[in-house]
Image (spheres, helix red, strand yellow):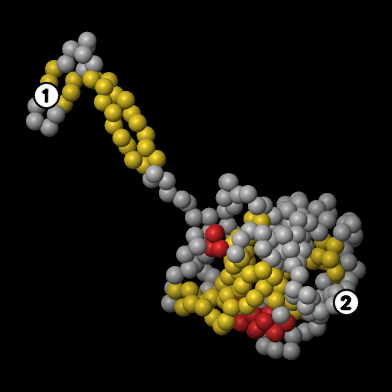
Amino acid sequence: MKKLSILSFTLLLLTACNSTNVTASEPIVTEQIIETKTVATPNITIPNESSQLLVVTTANWSTKDGTLQRYEKIQEHWTKVGKSINIVIGRNGLGWGKGLHITPDNAQYIKKEGDGKAPAGLFSLGNGFGYSPSNFNMHFPYATYKTTDHCVDDSNSQWYNQIIDSKETKKDYKSFEHMKLRNNLYKYGITVNHNPNQIAQAGSCIFIHIKNKSGKGTAGCTAMREDEITTVLKWLKEDAKPLLLQLPQEEMVKVNLN
């Protein structure tokens, strides 16, 4: 709570019952204490049209470990769905990303290209993906990617932060990720709409995918076991406009999920 002192000089002092004349040589100095409250503007608001939410929480900004909890909005209230999932994020923790939230002016941690941090904030989801067509019922867009499909992480490219077919696109980039790897980490995944305006050096190619068996942190994605991500994929519904909310505990407590 802030206090502001105001000094006022007056020639006429009014009281509740009468008035008293005061000469100019006898100034009255009064001190008035005005109390003001600082009201914090929420930087994250869940859109009303969304009714599915993936909530990733970490203990702090620096850890790579966290949990994912699914939520569904039922009669205007957010309700937990299923058990929480142990996940890993970027090897260097979290940094505010570019999404559906407002980054605080005093933010200490900001996501940048190649920093090994996962993006913090609120993000829409793009599509599910995998190495082959899914063998389960899907209610969410799904793409099958090949080794020639690249996610471009070169900020100088017109295709920065986009997945393109390298056979059909003029290559103007020097750095990219294969969307079909030699391992199973992208066997199933979900694209996250981080940095949709392709702001240079703000971070690219953010996914939810299968985690490494060693449990090590990612380059910036959120990872879990294969059976867990297929459970999430089966649950997602395009009409529900699902979102990813990803924050350390100190920021998550500021979000109202009633």
Q: Which residue is mark 2?
A: 182
Give the residue displayed 91% in from the left and 68% down from the top.
167
Question: Is 106 drawn above or below residue 192 in the view shown?
Answer: above
Density class for disc 1 (Cα within 10 Å; few <14, some 14-19, many ≥20) is few
Q: Which residue is mark 1?
A: 19
Report how far apart the C-alphas of labels 1 and 2 lie in the structure. 90 Å
Give the residue displayed 69% in from the left and 55% down from the top.
111
Residue 239 seen anywhere in this rendered image of the structure: no
Splitting the image into 4 quarters, where does residue 218 fall? Answer: bottom right
Query: Disc 2 marks which amino acid?
Result: Arg
- Left or right of residue 151: residue 249: left
Q: Which mark is residue 111?
A: none
Badge count = 2
Density class for disc 2 (Cα within 10 Å; few <14, some 14-19, many ≥20) is few
Residue 63 seen anywhere in this rendered image of the structure: yes
Q: Residue 92 in the image: x percent, y percent?
A: 72, 60
Front position in the image: 134 or 168:
134
Give the residue displayed 57% in from the left and 76% down from the top.
70
Front position in the image: 223 or 175:
223
Q: Residue 195 in the image: x percent, y percent?
A: 69, 58
Splitting the image into 4 quarters, where does residue 233 fall? Answer: bottom right
